[in-house]
Image (cartoon, rainbow, N blue to C red):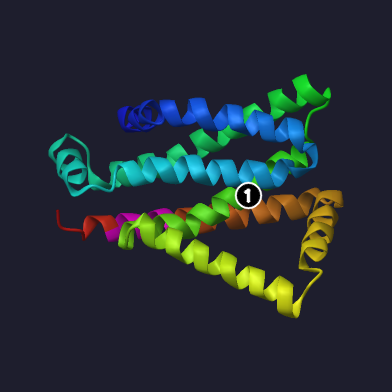
Amino acid sequence: MLQLIRKDVMLQKNTLLIMLPLLVVYIALNASATILSGVLFTIAITMQSFMLDEKRQIHILFNSLPYTRKEIVTSKYIGVFCFTGLVLLTILIANLVIHGESPTWKELLFILCLTTLFFSFSLPFSYRFKSQYLLFASIGTFAAYLVVINVFIPNLHDLIREVVAFLLAMEQVQLYVLVGCALVIVYILSWLLSIRIYEKKMF
């Protein structure tokens, strides 16, 4: 299974060489958007890795190798944390070098939580359908978001910023532990669902 994870990283080498420097440039231009940039870049890099494996021939090859379908799915779920770790490390180093300060551990944890939540839903969806449908769904969601902020809730951006600032300002460690445990459970359930979906697929 470690070879599968290594394969994902190696296939993403060119993407990483493009996306991570772009992330550094984005941080240099907009230091206040650490959370947004971290989440978006992690999603982009990880979904690109998933899309590379969606060809039927690749799945036939995978299933002819000495790997179980459970291991193939598990490698993707572990890969999420690998790519998230690379993005978080880039954010940490870029902020230290460019701005002379590091993001708070709460900001980094917030990025990890948001990406974990996103992939808890997107990976089973992508195994059941295809990631291109997830792209269509994302575009539709974004369009609906634009309608909401232009018609119904014009100050939605400000409300979201206030909620994020409120969450980052909280000092209750128990709450972070509770949220972390909930996300772990959701991620495990997502992993089990993806395994079930993938095991029933015919290639």
Q: Residue furthest top?
A: 97
Give the quarter of the image for residue 49.
Answer: top left
The answer to whether residue 30 is left or right of residue 37 is right
Q: Main secondary structure of the magenta part?
A: helix
Q: In the rendered image, which quarter contains the N terminus?
A: top left
Q: In terms of image quadrants, where is residue 11?
A: top left
* Residue located at (81% from left, 65% from top): 159
Q: Nearer the viewer, residue 31 or 129?
A: 31
Residue in the image at 76% along x and 38% along y: 30
The number of numbered badges drawn on the structure is 1
Above or below, 176 relative to 79: below
Mark 1 is on which residue type?
Cys
What residue do we see at 35% from left, 29% from top?
Answer: 2
> Which residue corresponds to mark 1?
113
Residues drawn in magenta: 189-197
Q: Residue furthest bottom?
A: 152
| Residue 95 locus on image (x, y percent) | 75, 27
Secondary structure of the residue carrying numbered label 1: helix
Tell me what residue is drawn at x 48 percent, y 39 percent: 45
Can the viewer see residue 112 in this picture? no
Q: Is residue 131 left or right of residue 119?
A: left
Left/right of residue 169 with respect to residue 157 in the rendered view = right
| Circle 1 Cα neighbour tier, 10 Å, few/some/many (<14 / 14–19 / ≥20) | some
Above or below, comparing residue 160 to residue 75 in the picture: below
Is 135 in front, or is 8?
135
Task: Look at the image and say whether residue 141 sits in the magenta stretch.
Answer: no
